[in-house]
Every structure is written in structure tokens, then in C-alpha cells.
Image: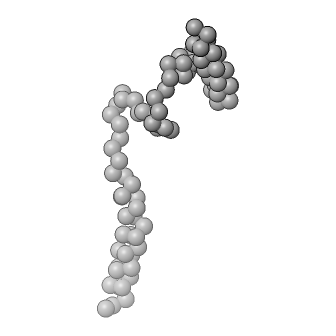
Amino acid sequence: MTISSRVAAALGASFLLFAAPAFAQSNTAAPAAGSQMAAPAKSSKARSPESLECSKQADEKGLKGKERKKFRRECIKEAKGAAKKQ
């Protein structure tokens, strides 16, 4: 085996070694234009009506991060307390 064929073989092997993971990851399909991707579910539990309503209210107020969490926690607590009184 000549030196040039050894170099060519080494280059080919290195190409396969480093390029294969890139090709393996690129087979994911892109979402169609205009479609919305679903948010990853943290649990399989269905959300309560109180939780959904409080999320809508937080969206309307434009709350994000810690403020949103605090608002939703208090809102759900109040909504469940009001439901128990009825």
C-alpha cells in the first residue's frame, strides 16, 4: 500500500467518523409552515379547569417567569378555595 493510498484511506475514515453523527441528527422533519409545535408535556396529568383559566389570565396580563408562577399559584389557590365554598 502506498503512502498516498494510506492518506486517502485515513481521510475517508476520518470523514466517516466525524460526519456520521451530523448526518444521523439531520433526519428530523421540519414542521410545516404555519403549524404550531406542541410544548413538551412535563407530566401526563390533565390540567384542571382552574389551572387553564389562571393560565389564560396570566397570558392576558403578559406575565412571565417568576411573576407568572406566583400569579398562577395564588389564582389556583383562590379558585379552588371558592369552588369548595360553593
Q: Residue furthest bottom?
A: 1
Q: Which residue is painted at 34% across and 80% down in the image?
A: 9
Screen quadrant of the N terminus: bottom left
* Residue nearest the viewer, comparing 51 with 6: 51
* Residue nearest the viewer, comparing 31 with 16: 31
Screen quadrant of the C terminus: top right
Which quadrant would residue 6 be assigned to in this image?
Answer: bottom left
- How far from the left and from the top, in percent, is residue 43? 49, 38
Q: Which residue is painted at 64% across and 20% down in the image?
A: 77
Asked if residue 83 is positioned above or below residue 29 in the image, the reply reads above
User: Is 15 on the left or on the right of 54, as rendered?
Assistant: left
- How far from the left and from the top, in percent, is residue 31? 35, 37
User: Is 85 on the left or on the right of 15, as rendered?
Assistant: right
Which quadrant would residue 20 be assigned to in this image?
Answer: bottom left
* Residue nearest the viewer, comparing 10 with 53: 53
Query: Is residue 56 visible in this depiction of the protein?
Result: no
Asked if residue 11 is positioned above or below residue 68 in the image, the reply reads below
Q: Which residue is painted at 33% across and 44% down in the image?
A: 29
